[in-house]
Image (cartoon, coloured by chain):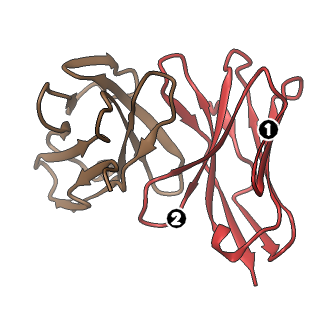
Chain colours: A red, B brown
Amino acid sequence: DQQVKQNSPSLSVQEGRISILNCDYTNSMFDYFLWYKKYPAEGPTFLISISSIKDKNEDGRFTVFLNKSAKHLSLHIVPSQPGDSAVYFCAERGSQGNLIFGKGTKLSVKP
Amino acid sequence: NAGVMQNPRHLVRRRGQEARLRCSPMKGHSHVYWYRQLPEEGLKFMVYLQKENIIDESGMPKERFSAEFPKEGPSILRIQQVVRGDSAAYFCASQGQRKETQYFGPGTRLLVL
């Protein structure tokens, strides 16, 4: 059973607009959440993270929101750029530091 | 650029052969995680190692798979008697201290014929 769910396999957005990627989780014991970005034939690249004691973390064009009561987090990219086109993975950090990933959402930003 | 290195990048094996995947962590990092990505899936944790120790192997298949991280040299993920279902991308990630950010290598794409 999946502990981290990304229900949208793909998302298409116009350049300059906002991209919103969503993620739901089941285990309320986890205390740290991360977003990774992955281009084809490359390894995932760390993007941004958030601790469960916060509800928002911002880094440039990227903002992650955490709603603990709904067990939901989202990644906002504003403004979206064509270079943002990639697969985005949401992950929780497990007790031994291992990451538990969702299946990913493929973002396409059209010029 | 002293990033995480993995080799080979691509590996083709016939059923029943052995596959050896290597991972050199970032300089100064002593924690290594291995993950596997099957087609159309997310990455799945396999094993967590520190130098000379296996810390958590709860994600490793019980048979044919083993991992090590010797005092000197890279971490090795070994798959014996490969089957077609082992075809996947295998990623390693290194970490300086526990609970710091994990940095991923480019992966090894294993194809079993």
Question: Same chain for the residues at labels 1 and 2, yes or no?
Answer: yes
Residue drawn at the location 28% of the way across and 39% of the way down: B27
The residue nearer to you, when weighing B104 against B108, is B104
| Three-letter code, disc 2 | Tyr
Residue A54 in the figure: left or right of residue B71: right
How far from the left and from the top, in percent, is residue B113? Answer: 21, 62
Locate the C terminus of chain A and report the quarter of the image it occupies: bottom right
Residue drawn at the location 81% of the way across and 26% of the way down: A54
How far from the left and from the top, in percent, is residue A48? Answer: 66, 44
The residue nearer to you, when weighing A3 against B5, is B5
Q: Which secondary structure, mark 2? A: loop
Residue drawn at the location 52% of the way across and 64% of the way down: A39
| Three-letter code, disc 1 | Leu
Residue ID for mark 2: A39
Residue ID for mark 1: A73
Query: Splitting the image into 4 quarters, where does residue B47 fall?
Result: top left
Query: Splitting the image into 4 quarters, where does residue A78 fall?
Result: bottom right
Locate the N terminus of chain A and report the quarter of the image it occupies: top right
